[in-house]
Amino acid sequence: MVLGFMNQKIRIGMLGFGTVGTGTYRMLLDNREAINRKIGREIEISKIGIRDATKERALDQAHFTTDLNSIVTDPNIDIVVELIGGIDPAAELVEAALMHGKHVVTANKELIAKHGSRLVHLAKSKGLDLHYEAAVGGGIPLVQPLKHQLAGNEVIRMMGILNGTSNYILTKMEEEEADFADALAEAQAAGYAEADPTNDIEGIDTSYKISILASIAFGKQVPVEAIYREGISKIGITDIEYARSWGYKIKLVGVVDAVGNDAVSVRVHPSMIPNSHPLASVNGVYNALWLHGDFVGDVMFSGRGAGSDPTGSAVIGDLIDVGRNIVGGGSGSAIPYDMGMNVVPIDDIQSAFYLRLVVKDRPKTLGEISMVFGAHEISIAEMQMRTLPHDQGEIVFLTHRASEKAFADAIKQVRDLESVASVASSIRVEDKQ
Amino acid sequence: MVLGFMNQKIRIGMLGFGTVGTGTYRMLLDNREAINRKIGREIEISKIGIRDATKERALDQAHFTTDLNSIVTDPNIDIVVELIGGIDPAAELVEAALMHGKHVVTANKELIAKHGSRLVHLAKSKGLDLHYEAAVGGGIPLVQPLKHQLAGNEVIRMMGILNGTSNYILTKMEEEEADFADALAEAQAAGYAEADPTNDIEGIDTSYKISILASIAFGKQVPVEAIYREGISKIGITDIEYARSWGYKIKLVGVVDAVGNDAVSVRVHPSMIPNSHPLASVNGVYNALWLHGDFVGDVMFSGRGAGSDPTGSAVIGDLIDVGRNIVGGGSGSAIPYDMGMNVVPIDDIQSAFYLRLVVKDRPKTLGEISMVFGAHEISIAEMQMRTLPHDQGEIVFLTHRASEKAFADAIKQVRDLESVASVASSIRVEDKQ
C-alpha cells in the first residue's frame, strides 16, 4: 500500500523559471528525499512553462515548453505552481488551472492582492487548494500563521517592513550616511534593486503585500487602490540624522489599523520607528511583520523577504501542504473571503509627524509657523533649529498626534508663508511606548 | 445545507481550567462569532473537567465535572482540549480520547516531549488530529510553521529563548543590576515565577520545548533525557556586567545543531549572545525562536511565550484548524514521527566559553592558568583582570571555540591549581557574526 502510494507521483507544472522558479527547483532537487517523505508520495516537476525558449537554462530543454496553456490543461498535472508574476497572463492561467481541477501554489502578490477573493472562492468551490505563502515576506511564514495559528485573534494593528529593496536602501543611508541616489545605485549594483525601481521604492510592492495580509486578518479583500501610498525617494540623509538624534529609524512600512467594528486603515509610507520597537532593528534586505492581537499580544516574524532560496522555501512549504492534502484526501483547504473591505481615507486618521522646513533667517519665522500649527490644533512635542548658509535656517518639528487632514491643511499654509523657503520633508512618526 | 452545518455544533470537552483554560474559554467567548465563521460551524464547550470541585470558578457549576474520564469517553464530544499539564493523568486521558475517536488539542509540553511520537502515531492511525501549538512559545506560531511553511528546509541550527520566567529574571538582572535571588523574588511577586521555580530556572521547561521543536525539525523524537541541561541560578550580576563589556547579553537558550547527516546536538544552557544577534534584544517575558535553514536562511519568531491570553490564542488557533478539518472532512492532519533521534553527547561538540576565576594575587597565577589552557588546546580570545580585596584577583577569559571535553578537563585542572581560589562561573558564548 505504501509502495503503491509512492509509485503514483504527484506531478507539478511550473509556470515561469526566473529567480523564484530556479530556487524552487533547486530546493526540490537538493532536499528531494525529505520532501517526498513529508508528503508521503513522490513529487515530480513534469513541465516548466517559459516565455522565451531561446534563453540559456540550467536544465535539459525537454522539460520546457512555451505553450503555458498546455500546462494548466494537462490532465496528468496535479499542482500548478505559478511563478510568472503580474496579472497578464498569470490571472487567466491560474483561473484555467483551477477550472481544470488543479491545485495552485503561487508567489504572485499582485495577483492575490487584486484577484484573491475571486480565485480563492473558485478554488473552494472546486475543492482545491490555492496557497500563496511566498507572495508575502519571501521565506518568512506569515500568510498561513495569520490564517491558522493566529486566527482566533481580533487583529488590532499590523505593521510590516515588506520590501527588501527599500529596507536595504534605507539601511545603507543610515549606516553609510549615503544619500538616496547613491544607496539606490548600490542596491542596483548588488542585484537588490531593478533597473526601474519604481515598484519597490514607491511602495507599490508593499501595498500588494499589506493588502493581502489585511484581507486575511480582517476577512475581506482590501482594494489596492484604497491604500494610501507614499514612497521613500524623498527621504534625505538629513532626515535620517534628525531621526537618529531623537531615537528613531526611518523605515518603509505597511500599516493596518482596525477602525471601529467594520473598517480598517491601510497605508504604506515611510515612518519614524522608535529604536525600542522591534521593527527598528530589522535591517538590510530583511523583512518583518509585527502584529498586535487582542489575545496573543505582540508577535513578530522576521527573515529574508525575497530572493531565490527563501522564496523557494515558501513555495515548497506550500507544495508539501498541498501534497499532503492530496495524499490525505482532504477537500481543499482554501479559506474564502469576500470583496468589499471598508477602508477609511487617510484624512480620517490621526498621526504624529516629523516636519523639516527650510526657512528664511528672520525674527518672525518661528512665531508665524507656530501660529499656523496652533490654528489647526497641532501641538509640538520636540523642535530643533539650526542656521544654514545664505541667510537660511532649518526648523525641524516632532508633533503630537493630530488629524491627518489638519496636518495636510497646515502644511499647505506653512508652505505659503513669506518666511518659509520650502517644506523639505514630512514623515509620520510611531509613538514611543 | 449551510444552515444544517451551523446547527450541528462542534462539541469541546476541556480538561483543566487553570491559567490556560480560562484564557481559552474567554477568547472563545469574546471572539465567538469570528471563530465560528472561520470554522464554518458553531463551536461549543460542553464539559469542563476539573480536579477540585470546591474551588471558586467564574462559571456556572453545571459546566464542570470532576469525572475527567467521562469527558474523554463522551460520544457527544468531538474535540478534547487537554490543559492539565504533566504526565499523570494527562497521558492516559489523551490516549483514551484518541481511542474514543476524539481529536485532541493540548498545551502540554511535557506530554508531547515524552510521548509525542506514540500519541501522534495513534492519532494518525485513527485519522484524527493531535495539535499542540500552545505547548511551545505560548502564542507565537512555532510548531505549525516548522511543520508546514518551513518543512522543505534542512534545519541547520535553531536557538530559542523558550522560558519567560528565566528571561524575565535575566532581564531584571541586566536592567536593574539586581542579583539572581532578588530578580527571582521580583518574578515571583509579579506572578511570573512559581513558589518552586525549579522547572523554569533549571531549564527543564526549556528542555521539553526544544525537544519538541527538534523532533519536528529533524523528524524523530529527541529523548528529553539525552538533552544536556544547565540552569541560570549560578549566573551572577558580575557575569552580566562582563558580558556587557564585551557586547553580549546572557540568555537561557535551547540550542539544536544538525551534526552530520543523522544526528543532532540538543542542549539547554545560559549563553552569551552577541548584541548584534536578534535574540539578544528579546527581553522580559518574551520568547523567541531563531532558526537557520538551508534555503530560508535566518528566520525569527517572537512574542509572549506564556500567560493565559497568548497561550489561549494558540489553543484556539489549533481548535479552528481541527474544526475546519471536521467540517471539510479531512482524514486528520497529524504528521507522525518515530522514536530514536541520535543525540550526540555534549562532550563531542565545540563551544566558545566565558570563564571567570577568583585567584590569589601572586606572580605566577596567569602563567599557570595559561599553561593548562595551552595543554588542552584552548586558545584565549579576550581577557580582563582586576584586583579584589583580601589579596585576591579576578581573571575573566573569553576562549575561542574548543572541544567541550577539553574545556571541562581544563576546568578541573584549573580548579586544583594552588593559585586559583575558585571557578566562579563558566558560560558558553555564541560567535559574533
Image (cartoon, coloured by chain):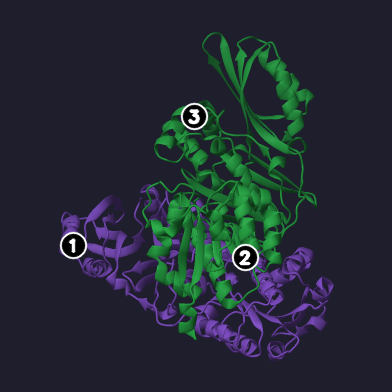
Chain colours: A green, B purple
Identity of the residue drawn at 53% across and 50% down: A84
Identity of the residue drawn at 82% across and 78% down: B60
Query: Closest to the observer: B125 or B247?
Result: B125
Answer with left or right where residue B63 lies relative to residue B340: right
Residue on which the image places disc 2: A129
Both labels 1 and 3 in a single chain? no
- How far apart marks 1 and 3 lie (CA) works out to 50 Å
User: Quadrant location of residue B325?
Assistant: bottom right
Residue A104 image point, x, y percent: 59, 61
Amino acid type shown at disc 2: Asp
Crowding at dot 3, Cα within 10 Å, few <14 / some 14-19 / many 20+, comes out as: some
Residue on which the image places disc 3: A180
- How far apart marks 2 and 1 lie (CA) works out to 57 Å
* Nearest-to-viewer mark from 1 and 3: 3
Amino acid type shown at disc 1: Glu
| SS for dot 1 | loop
Residue on which the image places disc 1: B377
Residue A344 image point, x, y percent: 77, 42
Both labels 2 and 1 in a single chain? no
Amino acid type shown at disc 3: Phe
